[in-house]
Image (cartoon, rainbow, N blue to C red):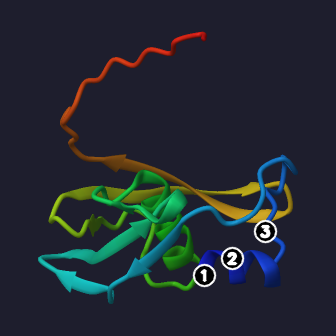
């Protein structure tokens, strides 16, 4: 319902590619905390079709850094640890400020780990 309401009320369009549009994921964010010289937060990302992602998500981490940078909540080069609902985390930093179309933007680095949790094979009977 949140995603639907946002897309009904706001026009969200990529500044250089009009085919990339609308909000597809909703991120619930915890408060920003300063821990051991870094900025930390926890999030839960609701993906397409209402599934909750177990990852802190790279796209979400990047977006969070962009917003925090624009609000002056994190400095360029400062470490941001974004934690997921299961405790996994991505460590990230804003490494540069730039422009994308007519918008201010950031260049970030993100590091983390992932594990293969399943391998599947699917077939489709043409009949």
The C terminus appears in which quarter of the rendering? top right
- In this view, which residue lies farthest toward the left? 36
Instruction: Report helix, strand or loop for mark 3.
Output: loop
Which disc number belongs to residue 12? 3
Q: Which mark is residue 86?
A: none
The residues bearing labels 1 and 2 have C-alpha atoms spaced at a distance of: 5 Å
Local secondary structure at mark 1: loop
The residue at the point 33 percent across, 89 percent down is 31
Q: Residues within 10 Å of mark 2 (few under 14, many from 20)?
A: few
Task: Judge whether 46 appears above or below 89 on screen.
Answer: below
What residue is disc 1 on? Answer: 1
Badge 3 or badge 2: first in the primary sequence: 2
Residue highlighted by disc 2: 4
Pick the front one: 122 or 50: 122
- Between 126 and 70, the residue placed more toward the observer is 126
Query: Which label sits in the foreground, 3 or 1?
Result: 1
> Pointer 3: residues within 10 angstroms few (<14), some, or many (20+)?
few
Task: Please give left or right for residue 117 compared with residue 80 in the image.
Answer: left
Quarter containing the N terminus: bottom right
Whole-Å distance between the Cαs marked 3 and 1? 17 Å
- The reply to whether callout 1 and callout 2 are in contact (CB within 8 Å) is yes
Q: Is residue 4 left or right of residue 94?
A: right
- Estimate the x, y position of residue 24 in percent, counting from the top left: 62, 61
The part of the image, by quadrant, that contains residue 21 is bottom right
Question: Which label's residue is closer to the chain start, 3 or 1?
Answer: 1
Q: Residue at x 49, y 55 (%)?
A: 59
Residue at disc 2, secondary structure: helix
Residue 90 horizontal/vertical position (percent): 27, 56
Residue at 18% x, 76% y: name it: 37
Q: Quadrant of residue 83?
A: bottom left
Which residue of the protein is positioned furthest toward the front in this rendering? 127
């Amino acid at each position: 319902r949140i995603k639907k309401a946002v897309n009904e009320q706001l026009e969200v369009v990529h500044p250089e590619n009009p085919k990339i549009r609308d909000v597809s994921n909703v991120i619930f964010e915890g408060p920003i905390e300063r821990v051991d010289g870094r900025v930390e937060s926890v999030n839960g990302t609701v993906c397409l079709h209402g599934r909750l992602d177990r990852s802190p998500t790279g796209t979400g981490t990047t977006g969070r850094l962009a917003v925090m940078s624009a609000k002056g909540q994190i400095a360029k080069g400062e470490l941001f640890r974004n934690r997921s609902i299961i405790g996994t985390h991505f460590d990230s930093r804003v490494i540069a400020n730039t422009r994308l179309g007519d918008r201010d933007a950031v260049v970030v680095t993100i590091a983390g780990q992932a594990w293969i949790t399943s391998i599947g094979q699917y077939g489709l009977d043409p009949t």
